Amino acid sequence: MGATIKDVAKKVGVTPTTVSMVLRGDSRISDGTKEKVLKAAKELNYYPNSIGRSLVKGKTNTIAIASHLFYGPFKTDILNGIDNELKETKYRTFNFPFKSGQEEEGFREMLFGRICDGVIAINMAMNKEVAALYREEKRPIVFVEDVVEGLAGVKGDGFQGSYDAVMHLIKSGRKKIGLVVGAYGEMVNVKERLGGYKKALKDSGLEFDKDMVMESRFYNFPEGKDICKEMLEAKPGIDAVFVGAGDLVAMGMMRHAKDTGVKIPDDIAIIGYDGLDSGSLSSPELTTVKQPVFEMGTRAFKMIMDMIENPEKKYEIEVFKPELLVRGSA
């Protein structure tokens, strides 16, 4: 169980009221006492339970949705899948935005602050120490896309999706194939898509060139235009790109190519990732790796609910198979 306000007070040698005043930012408490209280609270993993005070049996009937960003079609489809199941329950959700570099603190707050009954984490990484704490506390958490060993999750098979896409490009005669992936190199989906790309090249007798790999930080249309400009200028002879960073980036690349007179797929073939409906509206239509994103969201919610109702039940990582949708861009 998480620490209480009494535990913090005892460690510092003050009253629970003083601890409460410090945490509320009361100016009547000296700086020295504030420093001691805040240090003790951090060491004990204590977070104010602002919701729990009014609850019966410690239940919030709330699921936290954790993510760095809450925009973009991938996350929208995940959230729609969650909401589709949520409406049939007594539960509600709230978005818990994470700042880059503060993931550990955010996960600890959700664990020890008792602000929710469970967590669904979308495209989030967790270190081994915090993962061990979630297992020890038996706190329900489900990861979506970027999964954590030993904890429940749902994900697409990024390795296979990437492999299929790159092999399609190779079989169509492409020899100099670029890759665009997310900027978070330690995340599972980035590693898998890079791995599938490398394997397809190796199986086809083509050499891997790290200079043919570019990163996307924002996963959006304008960034795709910038990446395409840089690729065309810095990598002469490039004849195909697999955009593992998503369809929006791929469509941005297509727009820049079209604006500069580069023909798709004659001069350069482009394949996206995720299978957004908007890809069929581009010209030419975007070839893409489709993930069952909505279904991944519904499954994540069903898993978290089952874990809340059955705390002793063990869940593994469930992998969804992607599908290559061949259209006009490759």
Image: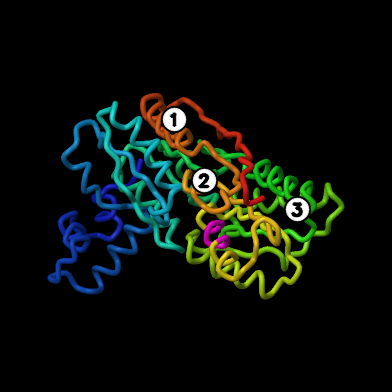
Q: What span is in magenta?
A: 249-254
Up-down: is 294 above or below 311?
A: below
Amino acid on which the number 1 mark rests in the picture: Met
Residue at the extreme left of the image, as rendered: 28
Amino acid on which the number 2 mark rests in the picture: Ser
User: Gap in Å between the C-alphas at discs 2 and 3?
Assistant: 28 Å
Closer to us: 147 or 113: 147
Q: Residues within 10 Å of mark 2 (few under 14, many from 20)?
A: some
Tag 2 and tag 3, C-beta contact below 8 Å:
no
Amino acid on which the number 3 mark rests in the picture: Lys
Residue depicted at 77% across the width and 48% down the height: 172
Earlier-in-chain disc, 2 versus 3: 3
In x, y percent, where is residue 221? 48, 61
Q: Nearer the viewer, mark 2 or mark 3?
A: 2
Residue linked to disc 1: 303
User: Gap in Å between the C-alphas at discs 1 and 2?
Assistant: 32 Å
Residue depicted at 24% across the width and 55% down the height: 9
Residue linked to disc 2: 280
Q: Secondary structure at mark 2?
A: helix
Disc marking residue 198: 3
In the image: residue 96, left or right of residue 146: left
